[in-house]
Image (spheres, rainbow, N blue to C red):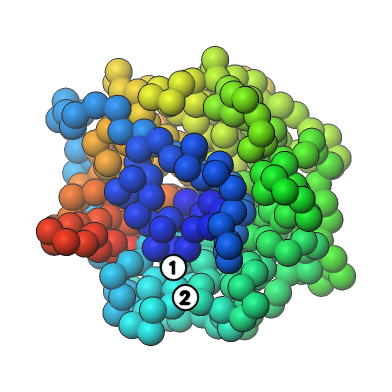
């Protein structure tokens, strides 16, 4: 599930991602936190709507979509899947609250909360550990993990925070220190369960963490500054390992990473202009564009250890897949009755998870989806 911006709730995020969020939403997110803002963790790469839909790319018909059950509300999203096929995500319940959930064998389980109106699950590792964030009764977001269904608050500093990725090497996320600019006050953290407190990763101000692999290499974004006069061109992807930070370069604009695999490969998106996004892979010290088929609004969201990559085509509002970094991009089939979709994660077996949306004439409804 894409990260939420300042002042957003879970439903805002899903609407942003599938209705307005496949348009260019960075400027809206950068407006700063509203009263009661839930989580100032930066959004993952947005996808602008830049063109009318076309049908020149063949669908990836080898994968079949299955809609996962929700909690009775109008929104559900699958954010991550581990190699055992267990899925983590977020769902709206009939009580009007958003809950972190997991799906095992297609059955949904609601995870414990911190007493506030919202929880999000952002990632799951191969041990079954799930991480994300929950709102407290006081209205602040705190990074958390769930193990065996038990909730633990991650000891990161700051008033707001979110854990975004987990591996056997630890958990990473972002928190905010006091200040007027919610982006300049961002800090990236690393925490290993059992430690008394999370470690702040050494990086320039405005940095976020987006992923961590089993060897402990972290990937994130730096220079995420609200006051930046040209923010699209200033964002930079980086990796961090054993105290050493490496910038990944650029394809002519800002770079925002979304995932890292155990081979150390990174995928993300270069925001060249507000209407041109170029998906990239960083591998063996080199940043290069993924095949786009001439499209200008593709994002690369996740990859597995075999090099299968998933993401979203913003112009068509469709989940997409690359079978390898050099393969042509293909569309994932739409679940029956839906019109929009987004690819969020892929496991070792090639199972893809994400979400899809439909419109009944008055409102949108979002469902969690597995493609396999």
Residue at image position (33%, 45%) is 20
Residue 330 placement (x, y as % from top left): 27, 34
Q: Counting other residues with Cα less than 10 Å from the Cα at mark 2, is it few (<14), some (14-19), or many (20 or more)? A: many
- Asked if the residue under mark 1 is in contact with the one under mark 2, i.e. CB atoms within 8 Å, the reply is yes
Q: Could you tell whether 352 is left or right of 144 in the image?
A: left
Residue at image position (45%, 63%) is 10
* 105, above or below 262, in the image: below
Picture quarter with the N terminus: bottom left
Q: Which residue in the protein does label 2 denote?
A: 99
> Could you give the CA–CA distance between mark 2 and mark 1, rounded to whole angstroms?
6 Å
Q: Which residue in the protein does label 1 denote?
A: 90
Q: Could you tell whether 332 is left or right of 40 in the image?
A: left
Picture quarter with the C terminus: bottom left
Residue 355 placement (x, y as % from top left): 33, 56
Viewer-side residue, 9 vs 104: 9
Q: Could you tell whether 174 is left or right of 251 in the image?
A: right
Residue 48 placement (x, y as % from top left): 36, 33
Snapshot quadrant of residue 358: bottom left
* 111, above or below 332, in the image: below
């Amino acid at each position: 599930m894409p990260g939420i911006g300042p002042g957003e709730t879970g439903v805002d995020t899903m609407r942003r991602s599938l209705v307005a969020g496949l348009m260019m939403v960075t400027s809206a997110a950068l407006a700063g936190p509203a009263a009661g803002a839930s989580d100032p963790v930066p959004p993952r790469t947005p996808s602008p709507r830049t063109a009318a839909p076309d049908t020149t790319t063949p669908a990836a018909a080898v994968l079949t979509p299955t809609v996962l059950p929700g909690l009775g509300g109008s929104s559900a999203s699958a954010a991550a899947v581990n190699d055992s096929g267990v899925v983590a995500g977020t769902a709206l319940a009939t009580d009007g609250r958003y809950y972190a959930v997991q799906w095992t064998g297609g059955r949904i389980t609601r995870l414990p909360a911190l007493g506030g109106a919202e929880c999000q699950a952002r990632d799951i590792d191969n041990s079954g550990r799930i991480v994300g964030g929950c709102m407290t009764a006081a209205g602040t977001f705190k990074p958390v993990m769930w193990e065996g269904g038990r909730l633990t608050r991650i000891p990161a500093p700051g008033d707001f925070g979110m854990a975004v990725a987990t591996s056997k090497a630890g958990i990473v996320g972002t928190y905010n220190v006091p200040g007027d600019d919610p982006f300049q006050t961002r800090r990236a953290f690393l925490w290993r369960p059992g430690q008394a407190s999370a470690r702040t990763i050494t990086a320039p101000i405005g940095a976020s963490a987006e992923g961590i692999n089993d060897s402990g290499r972290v990937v994130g974004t730096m220079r995420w500054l609200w006051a930046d006069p040209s923010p699209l061109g200033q964002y930079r992807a980086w990796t961090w390992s054993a105290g050493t930070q490496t910038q990944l370069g650029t394809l002519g604009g800002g770079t925002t990473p979304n995932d890292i695999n155990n081979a150390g490969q990174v995928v993300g998106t270069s925001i060249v202009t507000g209407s041109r996004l170029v998906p990239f892979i960083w591998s063996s010290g080199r940043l290069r564009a993924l095949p786009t088929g001439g499209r200008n609004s593709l994002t690369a969201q996740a990859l597995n250890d075999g090099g299968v990559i998933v993401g979203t085509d913003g112009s068509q509002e469709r989940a997409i897949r690359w079978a390898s970094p050099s393969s042509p991009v293909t569309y994932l089939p739409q679940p029956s009755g839906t019109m929009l979709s987004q690819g969020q994660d892929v496991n070792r077996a090639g199972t893809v998870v994400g979400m899809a949306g439909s419109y009944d004439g008055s409102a949108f409804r979002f469902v969690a989806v597995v493609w396999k």
